[in-house]
Image (cartoon, helix red, strand yellow):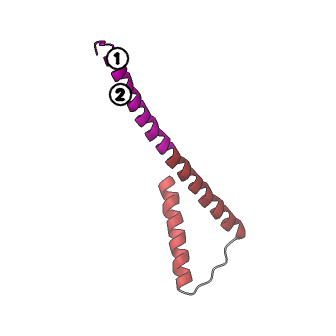
């Protein structure tokens, strides 16, 4: 279903661009334009959130690796078996 929406959305935009290039003017429903703008903004916000989550996960992994390194050196100071 998601792929269908994406293809449909791309087709609509490409046909709109073609029509504009060909000199055809098509009036669009203002409600559709508003919904299209809201959808684009929501998709942008979702991508920003996904990027932030990926960044935080990467930081978490780096910090957990650093924590393991520090704990290994702490145990080595006291001669504890690994």
Q: Which residue is mark 1?
A: 75
The crowd level at tag 2 (other Cα within 10 Å; few <14, some 14-19, many 20+) is few
* Residue 33 versus residue 47 in the image, above or below: below
Q: Quadrant of the C terminus?
A: top left
The crowd level at tag 1 (other Cα within 10 Å; few <14, some 14-19, many 20+) is few
What kind of secondary structure does the magenta stretch mostly adopt?
helix
Q: Which residue is mark 2?
A: 69
* Element at label 1: helix
Q: Tell whether 13 sits left or right of 72.
A: right
Q: Position of residue 24 (x, y in %)?
A: 59, 85
Q: Quadrant of residue 27?
A: bottom right
Sequence order check, earlier mark of 1 and 2: 2
* Element at label 2: helix
Instruction: Give yes or no for residue 77 being in the magenta stretch.
Output: yes
- In the image, the segment drawn in magenta is 53-82
Q: Give the camera-side residue of 77 and 64.
A: 77
């Amino acid at each position: 279903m998601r792929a269908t929406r994406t293809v449909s959305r791309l087709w609509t935009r490409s046909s709109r661009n073609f029509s504009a290039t060909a000199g055809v003017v098509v009036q669009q429903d203002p409600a559709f334009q508003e919904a299209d703008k809201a959808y684009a903004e929501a998709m942008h916000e979702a991508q920003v959130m996904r990027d932030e989550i990926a960044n935080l996960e990467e930081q978490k992994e780096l910090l957990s690796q650093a924590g393991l390194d520090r704990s290994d050196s702490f145990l080595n100071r006291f001669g504890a078996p690994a």
